[in-house]
């Protein structure tokens, strides 16, 4: 979503919390910049049903607010795309 190419700051984020080996499915993950991973885990950013970033109003006035509506870059293979169900569940807890 940010187009970051510096691999050192990219992290794999779980959409649904890690609950053992079965939660390591590719559909339960997003590749995010480290700061966005933190915000995702804190439910301050989420992904809407169209695959666009949703930024919590708690971040209004910050540089993160400018990311509102930015689309995810999705894998070409549908089987590798993030779970819509998982993203919807995460979005319900947006702070």
Image (spheres, rainbow, N blue to C red):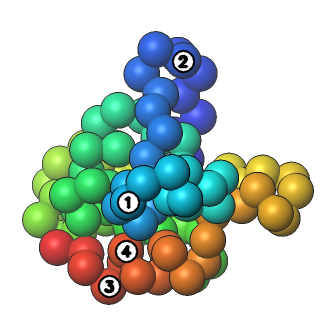
Disc 2, disc 1: CB below 8 Å? no
**Label 3 sits on residue:** 92
Structural distance between the alpha carbons of marks 3 and 1 = 20 Å
Q: Position of residue 31 (x, y in %)?
A: 54, 41
Element marked by disc 1: loop
In terms of depth relative to the viewer, which is nearer, 38 or 64? Answer: 38
Question: Where on the picture, by quarter, is residue 46?
Answer: bottom left
Looking at the picture, does residue 62 appear above or below residue 2? below
- Frontmost residue, 5 versus 24: 24
- For marks 3 and 2, the one nearer the N-term is 2
The residue tagged 4 is 90
Picture quarter with the C terminus: bottom left
Taking the spot 60% from the left edge, 77% from the top edge, the residue there is 84
**Residue under label 2:** 7
For image coordinates 81% across by 63% down, the residue present is 79
Find the distance from the CA under tag 3 to the CA under tag 4: 5 Å
Alpha carbons under labels 3 and 2: distance apart: 30 Å
Q: Secondary structure at mark 4?
A: helix
Circles 4 and 2, Cβ within 8 Å, touching? The answer is no
Which residue is the site of mark 1? 19
């Amino acid at each position: 979503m940010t187009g970051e190419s510096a691999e050192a700051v990219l992290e794999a984020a779980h959409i649904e919390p890690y609950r053992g080996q079965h939660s390591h499915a590719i559909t339960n993950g997003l590749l995010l910049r480290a700061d966005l991973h933190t915000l995702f885990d804190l439910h301050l950013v989420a992904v809407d049903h169209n695959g666009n970033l949703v930024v919590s109003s708690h971040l209004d006035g910050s540089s993160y607010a400018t990311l509102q509506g930015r689309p995810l870059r999705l894998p070409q293979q549908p089987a590798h795309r993030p779970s819509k169900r998982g993203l919807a569940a995460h979005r319900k807890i947006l702070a």
